[in-house]
Amino acid sequence: MVSESGKSGRKGGRPPGRPVGRPRGDGRPHLTREEVFVVTARLVAQHGVSGTSIRMIAGALQASPASLFHLFGSKAGLLNDMIAYAAGPSGAFYEALCQLDLPAEVALYKSIYEETRVVAAADRDQAALFYLPELRLPDFAPAQAVREGLVAHYHWLIAEGCMSGALAAAHPSLAAEQLFQLSETSILAGEMAQDIPAAAQARATADFCLRGLLTAPERLDSVRAQADAVPLTIEIPALVDG
């Protein structure tokens, strides 16, 4: 979800909270996709992908396995949908950001800042979902495509910045992947980053990246100020319950 001056919106897909699947056996309301994602994220964080079955997820939801198979087709389908759901707000943010016609270096700073901020603020188990080794397997091609789409945003901004002369990168595609991974550093930093506020991690990461890419590093203060003035934020949905 993208927030702008207090407004929020969701593009496409099923409206949040809409009932899906079959009623549960005890007469409780239909499941929502969000409920399934919350429980799945918690179980995968605890037991891994191979240790988490559809039957286990259904049991935690007090629903039938058939209902989950009806919704997602398979465990891989469920995980692909969950990754797309979690990454959706970032994609919507990038799309909205590009509509503002900002200088590429400003949009890039804002992108790195926001992505780092939400990753640093997210539950560690939720963030770790994006580093599951199983996501490299063919069954998770949709999840891989989601990530590739996010990285493509960075590639486009770097290429635009290089064309304008504001940025310099010998290999824009490699730089895009590197920047995106730097925005996710908080996932792997663990205890080293726990005492650093999310906003401070975001500031340090965005400063570090742009200082290395700007052809005139002395412009960093100006780029930072312009990015801070952009009234857009990423709001990542919680996938791990309390």
Image (cartoon, helix red, strand yellow):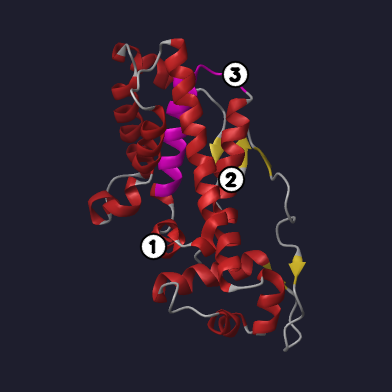
Q: Residues within 10 Å of mark 2 (few under 14, many from 20)?
A: many
Residue at 37%, 34% in the rendered image: 174
Residue identifier under label 1 = 133
Cα–Cα span, label 2 and label 1: 23 Å
Which secondary structure lies at badge 2?
helix
Check residue 101 in the rendering and tell me which mark sits there, or answer none. 3
Q: Amino acid at mark 3?
A: Asp
Marks 2/1 in contact by CB < 8 Å: the verdict is no
User: Which region is colored magenta?
Assistant: 100-119
For the stretch drawn in magenta, what is the main secondary structure?
A: helix
Residue at 35%, 12% in the rendered image: 219
Q: Which of marks 1 and 2 precedes in the sequence?
A: 2
Magenta region includes residue 69: no
Image location (x, y in percent) of residue 200: 33, 38
Residue identifier under label 2 = 89
Please name which of the two marks, 2 or 1, marks the residue nearer to the observer: 1
Q: Amino acid at mark 1?
A: Pro
Please name which of the two marks, 1 or 3, marks the residue nearer to the observer: 1
Residue at 57%, 72% in the rendered image: 75
Position of residue 99 in the picture relative to residue 215 (left or right): right
Total residue callouts: 3
Q: Amino acid at mark 2?
A: Pro
Q: Which of marks 3 and 1 precedes in the sequence?
A: 3
Up-down relation of residue 25 to residue 234 (above or below): below
Residue at 56%, 82% in the rendered image: 60
Position of residue 192 in the picture relative to residue 165 (left or right): left
Quarter location, residue 224: top left
